[in-house]
Image (cartoon, helix red, strand yellow):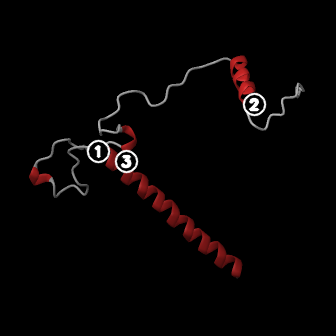
Amino acid sequence: MLHLLYILAFTILALIAVSNLIRNLLMFSFERERPYSATRSPSSRGKFPYPPQAQTVPHPELLDTSGNLIKDPLLVMRSINVEDAREQLDALYKASPGHSGGTQDEEV
């Protein structure tokens, strides 16, 4: 008898979870299809739940010390081959303070 009660309880919970999932998917699809205009008239501001954003504020990390927007790329990556990377890592290892300066090479 207790097994049937557990099965019934988990079935009800599963139905609630699936119905909630379907409802959220439908809400997101309707919100995606709803057109948002950049310029809204003052009379239509009460219809939308979100406040109008006339001007976006950039993230503080994208501003320099005087408050101007940085136009330069923040991260530049270049590709190097494996040998160059290994040489750079070996040079860092040999320059580290824990390096004993021995000539033993570890082979894997």
Q: Which of 107 and 36 is in front in this view?
A: 107
Callout 2: SS:
helix
Position of residue 30 in the picture relative to residue 80 (left or right):
left
Name which quarter of the figure residue 48 lies in.
Answer: bottom left
Give the residue at mark 1: 57
Callout 1: SS:
loop
Q: Can residue 108 be seen in this view?
A: no
* Extreme-bottom residue of the structure: 1
Give the residue at mark 3: 29
Give the residue at mark 2: 93
Q: Position of residue 18 (x, y in %)?
A: 51, 60
The quadrant the N terminus occupies is bottom right
Position of residue 45 in the picture relative to residue 92 (left or right):
left
What's the distance in space between the residues labelled 2 and 3, CA to CA?
53 Å
Q: Which amino acid does label 1 sit on?
A: Val
> What residue do we see at 54% from left, 24% from top?
77
Q: Is residue 39 visible?
A: yes
Number of callouts? 3
Position of residue 103 in the picture relative to residue 62 (left or right):
right
Q: Which of 70 and 95 is in front in this view?
A: 95
What's the distance in space between the residues labelled 1 and 3, CA to CA?
28 Å
Which tag is nearer the camera, tag 1 or tag 3? 1
Q: Position of residue 92 (x, y in %)?
A: 71, 29
Q: Which amino acid does label 2 sit on?
A: Tyr
Q: Where is residue 2 in the image (x, y as percent from the top left)?
A: 70, 81
Determine crowd level at label 1: few under 14, some 14-19, many 20+ residues with C-alpha closer than 10 A: few
Q: Which amino acid does label 3 sit on?
A: Ser
Callout 3: SS:
helix
